[in-house]
Image (cartoon, grey):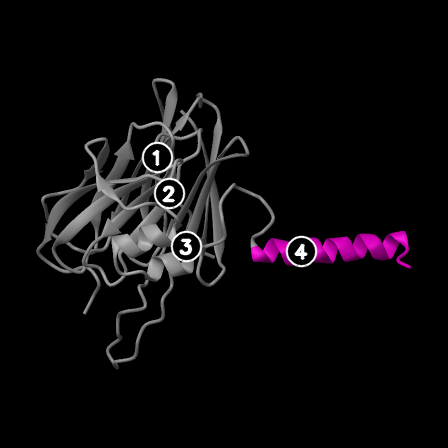
Amino acid sequence: MADPMRIRAQMAGDKATVRVLMNHEMETGLRKDAAGKVIPAWFIQEVTAQLNGKPVLSAQWGMSVSKNPFLQFSIKGAKAGDKVAVNWKDNKGDTRTDEATVS
Amino acid sequence: MLNRRELLSHSAKVAALLATTGLLPQVAHAAYNAAAFEVKTMAELVKMLGGSAPTESKDVTITGPDIAENGAVVPVGVSTALPGVKRLLVLVEKNPNVMSAMFEVSDAVDANFSTRVKMGQSSNVYAVAMMGDGKVLFAQKEVKVTLGGCGG
């Protein structure tokens, strides 16, 4: 199971700015190891986020998103104390969900 | 004739099968569009996604560094203040596959996303806004890369 994501959700006016740092290798599938063998592609494909359980964000990523992906977005109508959950799913079918409270 | 127990069990199995296909609605997004991430040019990509020919627009914004020291980690931002945008895409023109990321814009979020992408070489980076009426607008910025980001 991957390491937890770091999620910061802070109110800015009437919106919550959410910054996420995920832990993931994000292998493109284009690199070769020392022996010359191709390192298989392994990267986050789908990212979703919910505010208090309601879906607010949906994204699809390719292999060119950087390792340990960073994501920032802004949720309208959030308030302090709300729960933001972020989940991702990679090309091997692994998933991870983490949650933070809006401050 | 199915009895109730068999019917419930059957429904559960069908639901489980449907869940694995991603057809059960969780978030209003389509299943992963792998083909879109293998396309080489913006024109092909937009056509595949059902948009009309892309036009450059001052109402779409792409942010990024003029020079990226490390092509493996290039911070980019895509945004637009236009109403009616459905998707915001991040494209790197000279990458092996042109699209890096595709964000579905819901009513609950600003059409403003930042992330970090790998760039194989100096290239134009695009923010592409796909509008609800089929129009496609983009902004571009040239980002120079001193050390390519795809390894090797």
Calculate the distance from the C-alpha at mark 1 to the C-alpha at mark 4: 32 Å
Residue bearing the label numbered 1 = A73
Contact (Cβ within 8 Å) of mark 3 with mark 2: no
Q: Which quadrant holds residue B107? A: top left
Chain containing mark 4: B
Contact (Cβ within 8 Å) of mark 3 with mark 4: no
Q: Residues within 10 Å of mark 1 (few under 14, many from 20)?
A: many
Q: Amino acid at mark 4?
A: Ala
SS at mark 1?
strand
Calculate the distance from the C-alpha at mark 3 to the C-alpha at mark 4: 21 Å
| Residue at 26% over, 53% down | B42
Instruction: Point out the stretch of residues depicted in magenta.
Output: B1-21
Magenta stretch: includes residue B89: no
| Residue at 29% over, 53% down | B99
A23 vs B3, nearest the viewer: B3
Calculate the distance from the C-alpha at mark 3 to the C-alpha at mark 2: 12 Å
- Residue B35 visible (yes or no): yes
Mark sitting earlier along the chain (1/3): 3
Q: Amino acid at mark 2?
A: Phe
Residue bearing the label numbered 3 = A45
SS at mark 4?
helix
Residue bearing the label numbered 4 = B16
| Residue at 21% over, 51% down | B73
Q: Amino acid at mark 3?
A: Gln
Q: Residue B103's mark?
A: 2
